[in-house]
Image: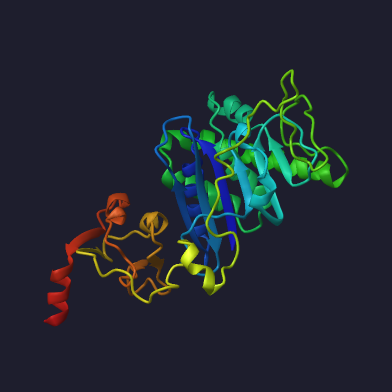
Amino acid sequence: MIEVVWHGRGGQGAFTAARLLGAAASLAEGKHALAFPSFGPERRGAPMRAFTKISDAPIGDRSAVSCADYVVYLDDTLLGDGWDSQVKPGGMVLVNSTRVFDDERILALDADGISSAILGRPIPNTVFLGALVALCDRIETEDVQEAIRQYMPEKLHAKNLTIVEAAVEAVRGAMGERATGGAGAASLPCAASEASDTGNPVLPRNEEGRETARRNQAACIPTLRTSSLDPADFAHSTCFEAGYLTVKNAGWRNMRPVIDAAACTGCLQCYLHCPDGTIFKVAEPAAYAPVAVDYDFCKGCGICVKVCAFGAVAMIPERDESEADAR
């Protein structure tokens, strides 16, 4: 499984990027993806996170990612102490920055500069879609481009497609420089910054020598599960893989979603947005709708109905379904 954590601020499009990446992966034959945000009572400009999971098998674990293959920072002020604990061995951190980092695991990309030059505004999210295309062989340029065409307003297509191409070129160039011994920063000319012996960026200090912040509190949010838990530890955690504790978890549902196979276009928006991962792709969609619902775990929240633009999902009372089964 490929896991991506997106750190951003409200208004930078972190969740949009996570969703577009999931949509792009889902377009590939045999691939499955989930994309979901982690919001608190945020306002525009406040730190937030989003997650994308990509796998060759259906994904049942909807929990937040604590250690990822790629960690993306849309704002470099969110990169602080402890960043390396969020990256898997062999993984990489992508940062929207013009700084230089003395650590091969960090790739600086002037996403604000690239997006400003093309969009006229510093909106960095689709820049990192292109960066991930260049770095991850599980993500194809054509699929990302198609996701942009399907899920972004038409007036934004051309410029965002150009941004993706520019980012792919910039990152491939930077990685080529690294291979030949260069600095490998995929950014416009910038001033170098200090780095500690561990490769972590050195924070600015005041006259007394104290670090003057830009520490990342949001990026270092503790998680309940950082590794596999021993069964004896279950009472001390609320973060489990889906279906681990029970074989059925939907007894309180009073409405259930029903998919109209004739109206379903296979856009996969319900699949991507389901907060409990209970909607799955059907292996033989010719005879059924391209997606189906696992009613043993569906909670009846109705999000799938809200995100379906084609009216292919409807909520019906649970008792009606039971009566229909009885007849």
Q: Residue at x 62, y 31 (%)?
A: 77
Q: In this orientation, does residue 58 appear?
A: no
Numbered disc total? 0
Instruction: Classify the position of the N terminus by image quarter.
Output: bottom right
- Of residue 231 and residue 168, the one placed in the foreground of this image is 231
Determine the image quadrant of residue 226. bottom right
- Of residue 94 and residue 22, the one placed in the foreground of this image is 94
Check the image and tell me how it is coloured.
rainbow
Above or below, 11 against 265 in this view is: above
Q: Residue at x 48, y 58 (%)?
A: 63
Is residue 18 left or right of 127 when viewed as pictured?
A: left
Above or below, 237 against 135 in this view is: below
Q: Residue furthest top?
A: 207
Is residue 144 left or right of 37 when viewed as pictured?
A: right
Q: Position of residue 220 (x, y in %)?
A: 59, 44
- Of residue 146 and residue 283, the one placed in the foreground of this image is 283
Determine the image quadrant of residue 202. top right
Q: Position of residue 147 (x, y in %)?
A: 48, 49
Above or below, 31 against 109 in this view is: below
Q: In this orientation, does residue 35 appear?
A: yes
Q: Position of residue 232 (x, y in %)?
A: 53, 73
Determine the image quadrant of residue 190. top right
Q: Residue furthest bottom?
A: 327
Instruction: Classify the position of the C terminus by image quarter.
Output: bottom left
Is residue 46 left or right of 83 when viewed as pictured?
A: left
Q: Residue at x 82, y 44 (%)?
A: 178
Is residue 275 left or right of 66 when viewed as pictured?
A: left
Q: Position of residue 54 (x, y in %)?
A: 54, 60
- Of residue 209 and residue 220, the one placed in the foreground of this image is 209
